[in-house]
Amino acid sequence: MKKIALLGHGVVGSGVMEILTKNRKLLARQAGEGVEAAWVLDRRAFPGLPYSQRFTQDFSAIREDPEVAVVLEALGGVEPAYTWARESLLAGKSVITSNKELVAEKGDELLALAAEKGVHFLFEASVGGGIPILQPLRESLTANHILEIAGILNGTTNFILTKMFREGAAFGDALREAQELGYAEADPTADVEGHDACRKICILASIAFGSHFYPREVRTQGITRISPEDVAYAARWGGAIKLIGRARRAPDGRAALEVSPMFVPGDCLLSGVNGVYNAVQVTGDMVGTTLFYGPGAGKLPTASAMVGDLITALTQPAGSRPLPWGPAKPELSQPWEEHTAQAFLRVTGMEPDALETFFPGARFLEPLAEGEAAFITAPATQGELDAAQEAAGAAGGKVLSRITVLEGSR
Ligand code: HSE
């Protein structure tokens, strides 16, 4: 019998236990012998479960148990997850985590430590819930220079946007439902302000580009300022608004990362991703554009990814294909002001002719309200768009919205 320990019996942790129980025979076949949680660490007691007697609040019992080969961490947050992941690795145990905050902050360090100790540090569940994306990126796409990753990386916000703009739900009601379904973070600000998506694009970029990207260095904007009018204009333009995490290779080789709501054209498959589903579009120089799609949050999808990693850790030698994920190289990041973009703008107090002097090449949409102009800019840097916006503002134009366009096949 292979013994493992689970840290955290919340939404995801209890999902891991459910899979270990329900798919016990299948997992025993995959692992070559039965797999059992010897310990479950949680501050709370869970009486009445078949495994209630395995709960502990003492991490040292897990660290000191020589029979435990793998620790699954589903606590969330950097501490105490970081300390316990580190101590587990130092004790020669593999670590599997669903914790994006931990990986985005400490991924390079924990990977290096796992390599030094000859064990696994795996985190498929940290991005895209149940979608297999990290394994394909690190294995199946290695023949490519990755040119761009663009994805809907947060299930909660995609669920909220879908509920609000397809079903007319209020923001608070849609968020509450996402919380009840177990999609949202403990503090849902991380979802709605884009921080969760930011952690995930940093993890993807670190794997794709080979050096650590920190969330604090990435310009991040959430969904709280999107208005029904903006959504109506996106539909009129022929697309939808989605919260997108994007990492691109700029022509000079630097990496350009950002998280923000974007106008996604209708002929881009990301525009049709709804509800709690996530999708990650990866473009490589040889393969072209690929798309990974599936449930981006929730108990069993996320636990499915963790248990998949668990079987890998139990059956594959560690270190045979180390991740090319080194320390951060800030000089290889392109500042947001230098990113090339097109943007949607909604302006009052200025006629299209005057606006065109500030935004040459603007393509105007039919306005939805009197006295309002809406247009898509020609490509420019975000810094140039800032300057044009400021100049138009000084001349009396009031910018109500500015939303970046995800360049697609149109
Ligand atoms: N809060 C996250 C989301 C959970 O909504 O996507 C999955 O990482």
Image: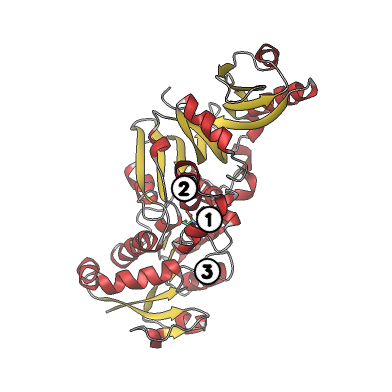
User: Farthest right residue?
Assistant: 394
Q: Quadrant of the C terminus?
A: top left
Q: Is residue 191 left or right of residue 355?
A: left
Q: Residues within 10 Å of mark 3 (few under 14, many from 20)?
A: some
Sequence-wise, the earlier of marks 2 and 1 is 2
Distance between mark 1 and mark 3 Cα atoms: 39 Å
Q: Secondary structure at mark 3?
A: helix
Name the amino acid type tagged 2.
Lys
Q: Secondary structure at mark 2?
A: helix
Query: Would you name the residue on which mark 1 appears?
Result: 173
Which amino acid lies under the numbered mark 1 shown in the image of this protein? Asp
Q: Is mark 3 within 8 Å of ligand 1?
A: no
| Residue occupied by mark 2 | 163
Q: Position of residue 196 (x, y in %)?
A: 54, 52
Disc 1 packing (10 Å; few <14; some 14–19; many ≥20): few
Residue 86 image label: 3
Is label 2 in contact with label 1 (beta carbons under 8 Å)? yes
Q: Residue furthest bottom?
A: 53
- Marked residue nearer the N-terminal end (1 or 3): 3
**Along the viewing direction, whichever of 337 and 9 lies nearer the viewer:** 9
Q: Is residue 184 visible?
A: no
Q: Quadrant of the N terminus?
A: bottom left
Front of the two marks 1 and 3: 1
Residue 320 screen position, x and y as percent = 34, 56
- Asked whether mark 1 and ligand 1 are closer than 8 Å, the reply comes as no
